[in-house]
Image (tube, rainbow, N blue to C red):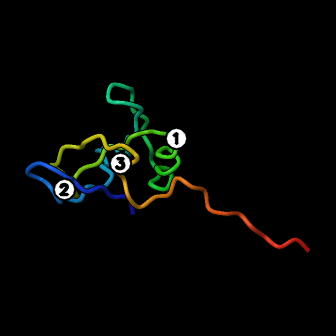
């Protein structure tokens, strides 16, 4: 599960999760002013994070405003690919 924790301000310690918009999609984008890319499948988010995209995240409530969170601040994913090994016969 992807999450981030607010580190300062009034909401310090609050856990943020990927924000699902009304169209049931998540949004990633490169930089604050770049266009966003809508993602329908939650499992695709880590591949975008590995390529430097930031993710819009919010508290787990429908009225919360999403914040753009950088990949370095997001926990629950790994930028390193899993080792691939198999036994040859």
Element marked by disc 3: loop
Disc 2 versus disc 1: distance between alpha carbons? 28 Å
Q: Mark 3 sits on what residue?
A: 24
Give the residue at x 49% y 56%.
43
Q: Earlier in the sequence, mark 2 or mark 1?
A: 1
Q: Earlier in the sequence, mark 3 or mark 1?
A: 3
Q: Nearer the viewer, mark 3 or mark 1?
A: 1
Q: Position of residue 73 (x, y in %)?
A: 34, 50
Q: Nearer the viewer, mark 2 or mark 3?
A: 2
Disc 2 versus disc 3: distance between alpha carbons? 14 Å
Q: Which mark is residue 88?
A: none
Q: Mark 1 sits on what residue?
A: 51
Quarter in which the N terminus is drawn? bottom left
Relative side of 86 to 37, left or right: right
Q: Position of residue 81 (x, y in %)?
A: 60, 56
Relative side of 22 to 81, left or right: left
Give the residue at x 25% y 42%.
67
Q: Position of residue 29 (x, y in %)?
A: 40, 34
Q: Residues within 10 Å of mark 2 (few under 14, many from 20)?
A: few
Mark 3 in CB contact with mark 1 (< 8 angstroms)? no
Give the residue at x 33% y 52%.
18
Element marked by disc 1: loop
Q: Nearer the viewer, residue 39 or 47?
A: 47
Above-or-below relation of 8 to 13: above
Give the residue at x 33% y 25%.
33
Q: Position of residue 44 (x, y in %)?
A: 50, 50
Mark 2 in CB contact with mark 3 (< 8 angstroms)? no
Disc 3 versus disc 1: distance between alpha carbons? 23 Å
Q: Nearer the viewer, residue 55 or 75?
A: 75
């Amino acid at each position: 599960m992807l999450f981030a924790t607010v580190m300062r301000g009034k909401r310090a310690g609050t856990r943020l999760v990927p924000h699902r918009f009304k169209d049931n999609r998540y949004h990633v984008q490169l930089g604050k002013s770049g266009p966003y890319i809508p993602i329908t499948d939650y499992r695709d988010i880590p591949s975008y994070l590995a390529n430097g995209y930031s993710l819009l995240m919010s508290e787990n409530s429908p009225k919360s405003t999403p914040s753009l969170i950088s990949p370095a601040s997001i926990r629950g994913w790994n930028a390193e690919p899993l080792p691939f090994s198999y036994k040859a016969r």
